Image (tube, helix red, strand yellow):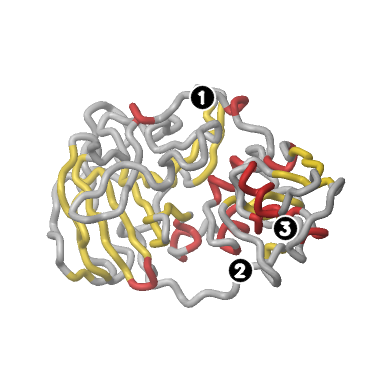
Amino acid sequence: MVLHVLHTSWNPRRWISGLALSPGRRPWVPGLLAGLAIAGLAPLGMSPQAIAQTSAAACPQPVLSRLTRHRVAPGETLTTIAQRYSLLPATIMGLNASTQGGTVSPGQELLIPPYNGIRASVTPGQTWEQVAQAYNSRADVLFEVNGCVGTVPTAIFVPGVNWFPGVRTTAAAAPAERQSPLQGYPLPSRSQVIVNYGWQPDPAQGKLVFNTGVALASPVSTPVLAVGPGTVAFAGSDSVYGNLVVINHPQGLQTRYANLDALEVRAGQTVRQGDRLGPVAPRASDDESFVFFEVRLNSAMGWVAQDPQNFVPAMVLR
């Protein structure tokens, strides 16, 4: 597959489909982590052709509303019940406190989820991003398996986390982080955000879509700048992206700059904050010119898209 984030004829004032993940998609289909790897990179963005045009109404019901009940029969053990439902014993133990000693009794009724994970309590006011960080998960996955609701419920299901004695089942607030190395701004001066990051309503499609970055309005030929020190992981052209620069930074961070008119850096080059990467490309039509900017964080699942405002202080809305 070819790397796709942004189509060169794309109008950023229209809602993005090519950079979006519909909440109706299955959770492990590439979304925040989609596309191909170039020059050894982890997957990047998603092709417009690869986006399933499913309605938000197709989002599955929350996992906690789909629990089934199993009455323990004579001779059954926790292990045999788990095997019957293709689950880990720890998953059943996490949902059924009476089994946490490792044994079950005939006639006992157990709650059974559709797949492995734990039930967690959430403090009101937390966001999907905060909960995902607490459990080393992904916000888009948690959003989908818990019913695609904007406000995080007080009780949620976290897939892929195994219960064990002492495991945290309350999503604590994220600890204070080190200062981000991304202290610059992708343009010489602050610019209008014409497409924002995150879950957005798409009136044209009647559903929510997920934008993996931000589009910043900027006149043609405006220099695009590195927001922090790092090493250029990729600098090249793509038939859909146009010219693209990817920079790896300290603390497992990565930034991506798309829709450049030319490339002024090369792969392997060390850059400093404020170094020029290339000028903003002209548009093929009368659409407003822009640079598309992403922040990604390295994880066991690859380079996961993040809200730039959480890592680039200059991008925080004032």
- Is residue 4 depicted above or below 116 in this figure? above
Residue 264, label in figure: none
Locate residue 24 relative to residue 227 in the image: left or right.
right
For the question of whether residue 307 can be seen, the reply is: yes
* SS state under label 2: loop
- Whether tag 3 and tag 1 are in contact, CB under 8 A, the answer is no
Locate residue 85 relative to residue 33 in the image: left or right.
right
Badge 3 crowding class, 10 Å Cα cut-off, few under 14, some 14 to 19, many 20 or more, is many
- Is residue 173 depicted above or below 72 in this figure? below
Pointer 2 residue: 174
Q: Nearer the viewer, mark 3 or mark 1?
A: 3
Give the CA separation, mark 3 to mark 1.
Answer: 35 Å
Q: Nearer the viewer, residue 87 or 236?
A: 87
Pointer 1 residue: 54
Residue shown at the point (30%, 59%) measured from the top left: 188
Badge 2 crowding class, 10 Å Cα cut-off, few under 14, some 14 to 19, many 20 or more, is few
Pointer 3 residue: 93
- For this orientation, the residue located farthest to the front is 75
Give the CA separation, mark 2 to mark 1.
Answer: 33 Å
* SS state under label 3: helix
* SS state under label 1: loop
